[in-house]
Amino acid sequence: MPNPDIIILGAGAAGLSAGVELAQAGLKVTILEARDRIGGRIFTKHDPVCDAPLELGAEFIHGRPPEIWTLLRKHHIRAREAKGEQWCAQEGELCKCDCFSKVEKILEKLDDRRPDQSFLEFLQRCCLENDPKLQEAKAWARSYVTGFHAADPALISVHSLVKGSRADEKIDGDRPFRMKGGYQTLIEIFRRQLDEADVSIEVNMCAQSVRWDQAEVQVTARDEANEAFTFTAPQVLITLPLGVLQADPDDDGALRFIPELPPAKLQTLDQLAMGKVIRLNLRFRERFWENLRPSHSTKSKTLSRMQFLLSHEDWFPSWWTALPEKWPIITGWAPFHCGERLSGQSESLVVEKGLETLGKLLRIGKRELEDLLQASYTHDWQTDPFSRGAYSYVKVGGDRAQSVLAAPLNNNLFFAGEATDVSGHHGTVHGAITTGKRAAGEILKTRN
Ligand SMILES: Cc1cc2nc3c(=O)[nH]c(=O)nc-3n(C[C@H](O)[C@H](O)[C@H](O)COP(=O)(O)OP(=O)(O)OC[C@H]3O[C@@H](n4cnc5c(N)ncnc54)[C@H](O)[C@@H]3O)c2cc1C
């Protein structure tokens, strides 16, 4: 078989979107993917009982990013906004709340004209008035940053948070949508486009080294039977997750660069971090919360319209339902320290801690919840050798880290993947797609 023009490492949103662009421009593309499936951190399972998609990775389209909506429109795929009520646990009681507006008031005070600082430093210096409401808003803002960004507040850069908020504003990023069939639908669109363009996708093919100091780049890889293969091409696009690039080259799934990456590139790997999350989808016999009336609310108010359930609980502080779909499914989100503690533990412990927390919040005995539970789904992205974390964030002082990581080397090594996004959309599917397109553009430019 003749060598391809380009080898892409990784078949996540970034690698697949780059593959489509390059193949449609006439290049012969081969994609090497370590897993037995494509999609990477998009990982949709199907719940047979509810006939519902269950996301183990990405779930929401954050706002109206054109990279996703253009595809949805073109392929006539419907997306629905996730709308409903927010409920918060406060002083042991559940009440309807608007935490996101409180958080917004704190985040508005972030300032990127000053030297960069961590979000924790910002919180320690800001809003010192002894106003209980303000202090409560600060606590929710901290939970938002650890939850949404899955980040350590002592590490995450305020500059990057401001950049992210500005980027989100342009696309209504605070409005969450879900596409029909789940995110797998998007992967299927890419797969069809790649098939039509005759792109070869080698799954179960884990890249181990990249030799990039010669005219042809050489990639060595192993399949699931540990058989070694060598692939060569004039150019290689690397879309592996940040966690994989940060790993020791001898670790499972990690990549060895021969010669080593230049010091500037290596330094940027330290200026970025992988956020940690364990998510847990629980499918119950029925939407039992529909009829629950938290003691503090008026008699007529039940949890039937509950979208988010937010708390400062230790194991699973945030929960959400499938609304507007009425599936009896509820998702728990354990970010940062909560995720770290659950990572590497058995699935039964993860489910147990989830039920324990949910029971405490809804005031239902764990036994009762266990009886209602029919199925659970979870995935540990931290111990997964092909992701080594959930999604990336920028550490204090890392203003330029993503663009240095994204920069091509030697006209033969190119980089994409959500961690290389420079537009404030890192850590998202649309951010990953943008980087794939950007890298494809860079490659095509070298050929004109
Ligand atoms: C729990 C969770 C929830 C999320 N929620 C959302 C959300 O609601 N909305 C949103 O927009 N984003 C969300 N994200 C983030 C989103 O999933 C990612 O930003 C995006 O999918 C990353 O795409 P990528 O192509 O950059 O990386 P990946 O999807 O990770 O693709 C990289 C590919 O490289 C492969 N690979 C790794 N090592 C090797 C190797 N040595 N050789 C060959 N292949 C290798 C991997 O298997 C993978 O397929 C979430 C992520 C997680 C984990």
Image (tube, rainbow, N blue to C red):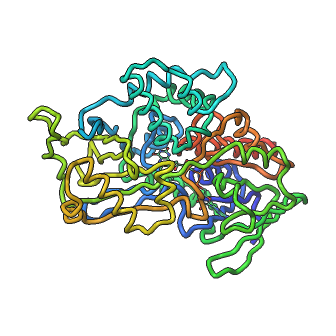
Q: Which image quadrant for residue 153? A: top right
Q: Residue furthest right?
A: 214
Residue 205: x %, y % from top left: 65, 70
Name the foreground residue: 237 vs 41. 41
Name the foreground residue: 421 vs 390. 390
Residue 234: x %, y % from top left: 82, 57
Query: Up-down: is 241 above or below 174?
Result: below
- Counting labels gives 0
Query: Up-down: is 183 above or below 385?
Result: above
* Residue at point 16%, 34% (across, down): 297
Looking at the image, residue 157 sits to the left or right of residue 269; the answer is left
* Residue at point 70%, 45% (across, down): 439
Q: Residue furthest front?
A: 130
Q: Which image quadrant for residue 405? A: top right
Q: Quadrant of the N terminus?
A: bottom right
Residue 87: x %, y % from top left: 27, 37
Looking at the image, residue 291 sits to the left or right of residue 437; the answer is left
* Residue at point 74%, 75% (across, down): 229
Residue 51: x %, y % from top left: 28, 60
Q: Quadrant of the C terminus?
A: top right
